[in-house]
Image: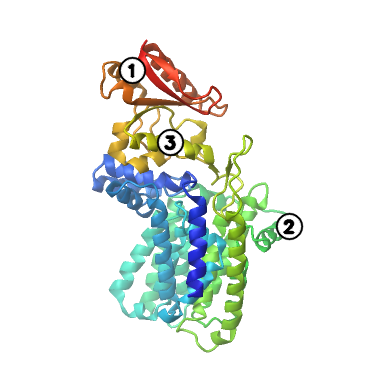
Amino acid sequence: MLALAGVGVSLVARIVHRGPYYPGFDVVGAANGLFLLSTRSPWTALREVLYQSRHYAAPFPYFGVLSALLPGALTACWPWEYWAHVVTFGLFLVILGLILLATAVPLRDAWIVLLAWGASGALLSFSVAGMPWVTGFLPHALALWIVLDVRLRRRWLLTVLLCLLATELPWHVYELGKTACLVFVLGALFVPDVPRGIRVLWLLSGAVGLLQVFAYPSVHVEAFTGLRPLAPAETWTRIATVGKMLATAWLDVPLLVVAAAVACLSLTRERRLLGLLFAVQLGLMLALAMRGADPYEVRPRRFLMVDLYALTLVASAWGRGGRTKPPRVRPVLVALLLAGNVWQLVEAVRFVRTPFERTAIRDFGFTLPFTESQVDYMVRYSDVDWSRELAARVEAGEKLLLVYNLGAYDENYSNPEALLERLYLHLGHQRFVDSVFAFGTNACRHTCLPIRPMRELAPFLDGLRAGRPVDRAAIVGYYVAPHRFDEPVFAREREQMMQAIRARFVVAMESPPDAKYVRFRLDGNA
């Protein structure tokens, strides 16, 4: 109960503190899933996702059955902007269940998994994030169950089906899921007492997964294969920097990893595979620190795989497969995890007690602890407030004319606010189409939205003057103030749209001249 209470309090504190201020990355995949399912047949949408999951080289899973279609389908049934967060959390619980199966932990001892979860501030935060970074471990957890569960070695058909699922899953979760092929390869090489046919099946599954990684490389795969050698002195400096990032709890509270190292002292022959895979993920994380101008390519979200293998190692000390040595280290593990729970809870309380900084100079920040990054995953609070205002006006029966599209600076590639996507998920597809009139040359960036082409602007405005498709009095307009980093095409479109509106209507401004998002009304015909 203590472990459950610690996790529950930590999760509730995070969710309440964040409120609606989640990063735009959290909802882009769900918006893409909703658009695909609303504009194509279910079979066509599925076929496109299966194709794009391998051919679209973006590092984020905008195309995936779990990362896009599932939250998109839920939104189609009941429009809500938080389905992506619910799906991530649900998949994380599935991961924990698979870890229990893989390590053969009895249900009465499942508290150890909760205690280990509560010792990781990063796992707690990313389990309630919409961006599914934490789901990268799902194929690993499934592969570990296949490799470590002795019962599956006697059930050929079930094992074959699970292996097929484990080789497809990495294309529908976050990218590091693709390294699950190593579980099969290393399992075939190092797990003892395995029937030859099963060992060959594992090798084939691992080979298929590995070949697909290089057959359909993404930018992350290219980043790892393009690592440059560093001088020994610089290498050790960067390793020391990563160690400091962990010791100071910037990456995560370090006691879960310490507990995993202690658990390695008590591994049985069969479970030594876990220690090897833990070391592999640590190595990949350190290799990432050797990339670029500094070691800060390592971020809390890129430490999640290490955390989850650490959690699995700790759980294995309570598994049925090794009860000779583990009892001797269990008190040490429990003490470390309890200290980790207290540490992360203190950090979480400190974080949630600090109000969002809303000043003219700094109107953005991180809204969950242990999710910091040097370049992205930040939230601009005033932008979210504007998106909520738009939703409230539609709920009140108004129609929106938006001089805004995906070319605005706030929708940049590295940290999109996803203001239209938030509104799209809140309203649902048909209500968005009926109530939100946005125009632009590009209706797609990573994903697509119901943005009307520029050629439809003039006929739409002419129709408004005649009361079609809606009464002009029901229209409330907004345009975003120019930004020096707006895409040139959007800068031109904004001028074209405002000129076309002013040529047909008397425009009454309702916002102060220095506002970022300027609200206006169409008072009468020009």
**Color theme of the render:** rainbow
Distance from Cα at disc 3 to Cα at disc 2: 49 Å
In the rendered picture of this protein, how many numbered marks are placed on residues?
A: 3
Assess whether mark 2 and mark 1 are in contact (beta carbons under 8 angstroms).
no
Q: Amino acid at mark 3?
A: Glu
Which mark is in front, 1 or 2?
Answer: 1
* Mark number displayed over residue 237: 2
Q: Is residue 30 visible?
A: yes
Q: Is residue 461 left or right of residue 412?
A: left
Q: Position of residue 389 (x, y in %)?
A: 43, 36
Q: Residue at x 36, y 59 (%)?
A: 168
Assess whether mark 2 and mark 3 are in contact (beta carbons under 8 angstroms).
no
Q: Is residue 83 left or right of residue 185?
A: left
The residue where tag 3 is placed is 389
Distance from Cα at disc 1 to Cα at disc 3: 26 Å
Q: Amino acid at mark 1?
A: Ala
Q: Position of residue 334 (x, y in %)?
A: 57, 78
Q: Position of residue 409 (x, y in %)?
A: 52, 32
Q: Earlier in the sequence, mark 3 or mark 2?
A: 2
